[in-house]
Image: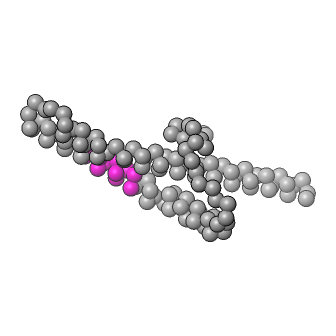
């Protein structure tokens, strides 16, 4: 293989690797948002068990909690249905169809720092 062709292949590989890393980071963000939604109802239910000075204060606090939960769900829905996410999921489906064998399930133990968002490169 000619040196020029090798450099072009390396550049393509580097771009592909960078694209895959960005996709993984986007999946990580979606996963963390989804995990945060697990605590939405328990947080709202926790308000019921705490004593309030008046029913009006309780209703006001509960309304704020519901509004906050609605915002979190809306943000997650927007993130999941975005064009970027759709492309990411479509690419994953195409890859899975092309190479159905050898796909290893992800485990949290594979990456102990998976809950830490990585800083994006400038």
User: Does residue 101 appear to the left or right of 109 in the view shown?
Assistant: right
- Decide: is 114 above or below 52: below
Q: Which residue is at the far bottom?
A: 97
Q: Going 72% across and 50% down the picture, which residue do you hit?
A: 14
User: From the image, which quarter does the N terminus lie in?
Assistant: bottom right
Q: Going 50% across and 57% down the picture, which residue do you hit?
A: 85
Between residue 21 and residue 99, name the one nearer to us.
99
- Decide: is 106 above or below 116: below
- Decide: is 79 above or below 46: below
Residue 104 visible in the current orientation: yes
Between residue 16 and residue 38, name the one nearer to us.
38
Q: Where is residue 48 in the image (x, y as percent from the top left)?
A: 18, 40
Q: Is the magenta stretch mostly helix, strand or loop?
A: helix
User: Does residue 63 appear to the left or right of 42 in the view shown?
Assistant: left
Q: Going 53% across and 61% down the picture, which residue do you hit?
A: 89
Q: Where is residue 49 in the image (x, y as percent from the top left)?
A: 19, 37
Q: In which quarter of the image is residue 77?
A: bottom left
Q: Which residue is at the far right?
A: 2
Q: Where is residue 16 in the image (x, y as percent from the top left)?
A: 68, 54
Residue 118 visible in the current orientation: no
Q: Quadrant of residue 2?
A: bottom right
Q: Position of residue 18 (x, y in %)?
A: 66, 49
User: Does residue 58 appear to the left or right of 5 in the view shown?
Assistant: left
Q: Which colour scheme is used?
A: one colour
Provide the residue span drawn in magenta. Answer: 67-77
Based on the picture, tell me whether residue 76 belongs to the magenta stretch: yes
Based on the picture, tell me whether residue 122 belongs to the magenta stretch: no
User: Does residue 14 appear to the left or right of 118 in the view shown?
Assistant: right
Q: Going 46% across and 45% down the picture, which residue do you hit?
A: 32
């Amino acid at each position: 293989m000619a040196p020029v062709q090798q450099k072009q292949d390396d550049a393509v590989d580097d771009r592909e690797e960078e694209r895959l890393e960005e996709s993984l980071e986007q999946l990580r963000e979606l996963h963390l948002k989804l995990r945060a939604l697990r605590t939405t109802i328990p947080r709202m239910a926790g308000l019921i068990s705490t004593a309030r000075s008046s029913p009006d204060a309780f209703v006001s606090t509960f309304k704020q909690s519901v509004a906050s939960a609605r915002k979190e769900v809306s943000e997650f829905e927007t993130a999941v249905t975005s064009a970027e996410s759709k492309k990411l999921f479509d690419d994953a489906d195409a890859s899975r169809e092309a190479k159905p064998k050898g796909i290893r399930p992800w485990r949290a133990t594979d990456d102990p720092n998976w809950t830490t968002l990585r800083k994006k490169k400038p």
